[in-house]
Amino acid sequence: MLEPIFFLVISLGVILLGAELFTNGIEWFGRRLQLAEGAVGSVLAAVGTAMPETMIPIIAILFTKGEASRDVGVGAILGAPLMLSTIAFFVTGIAVFAYTAVGRRTRRMSVDHKVLGRDLRSFFAVYAVAIAAMFVPYKPVKILIAISLVGAYVYYVRQTFRCCVPSEGEEIGPLHFHRRAEVPRLRIVIVQVLFSLVLILGGARLFVSQVTLISFAAGISSFVLASIITPIATELPEKFNSITWIRQRKDTLALGNISGAMVFQSSIPTAIGIAFTPWMANPHVVVTGLTALIASIFVWAEITWHKRLSPYTLLAGVVFYIPWLIFILKSHS
């Protein structure tokens, strides 16, 4: 048991290093392409760091056989948006208070409410359709729904890039791979981003493998592993990236990284699940989907009505996660 724990710690260090390089590199990439902060956080950063949790259901559904593998894939697909809308927001809120306590920032968050509001509305639309697809009995209709989800994400990306205005005044630290350059070359920026993604993917894969070993040794079921443990492991990149940006007081990037990943996770991997699995409703998947929607609506309400976001609202994510966790554990005990 000591060896998996040792490698678990190593994997966390690798992910943390990759997240630091990624956040720094993706900001410079967006600056060189004259992209807005919202587009960088909600699309580039979100998709880049969503790769670990996206590959798990793809491999489980498309490249492995058996009902257990299919259950792992569906559990990972549904668990990712839930984890982002609850624990990821909660950890980000904790980071705000932690960095305020050490004098790195204040509790007041500066978030572009238009960017975050659009992300959450897009998430509601695609995820609600994905849940409704579980009650559709005809496979051809499900295939059309899957295609529509992919199209919806393409439209979301297009609108995100079109509506956001580049912010030239935002300060960015020196590129880690070229610290002496005032404006680093684009090819060096790309090399750093790609290298950081390799670290994040490698670290997340190592983390998942060690968590799997520990969970099996502890006698945890495959569904619990897929819907609880695996999403926690694979969502670490988003959490580390967001914590890094919270420390730098770049709140739109921090929250957009999470909300953009929610849109991606509820459309592309979900479309694969709808198209290549039975995608049938049961109490566990319905409760998981509804919990993710309700938790995100709580954040959306403050953004929409008050045009701001409080870290206290982010902390509420754990309030939605704990009852869901108790329900899942009791139903599989």
Image: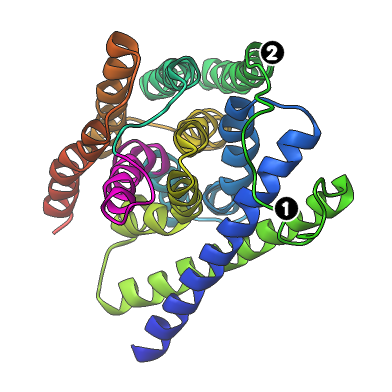
Q: Earlier in the sequence, mark 2 or mark 1?
A: 2
Point out the image quarter for the N terminus: bottom left
What percent of the width, then of the height, locates residue 311? Answer: 27, 36
On residue 162, which mark appears?
2
Q: Residue 214, relative to residue 176: is it above or below?
A: below
Q: Residue 94 lies in magenta, yes or no?
A: yes
- Please provide the residue range marked out in magenta: 80-106
Q: CA distance from mark 2 to mark 1?
A: 23 Å
**Residue position for label 1:** 193
User: Considering the image in quadrants, where does the C terminus appear?
Assistant: bottom left
Task: Identify the amino acid type marked 2.
Answer: Arg
Report helix, strand or loop for mark 1.
helix
- Residue extending farthest to the bottom is 2
Which residue is more in the foreground, 194 or 166?
A: 166
Q: Amino acid at mark 1?
A: Val
Residue 319 placed where, x, y %? 15, 39
Residue 196 shown in magenta: no
User: 10 Å neighbourhood of mark 1: few (<14), some, or many (≥20)?
Assistant: many
Percent x, y of residue 43: 62, 31
Label 2 sits on a secondary structure element that is helix
Q: Which mark is residue 211?
A: none
Q: Give the side of residue 159 with respect to residue 135, left or right.
A: right
Asked whether the viewer can see residue 58, the reply is no
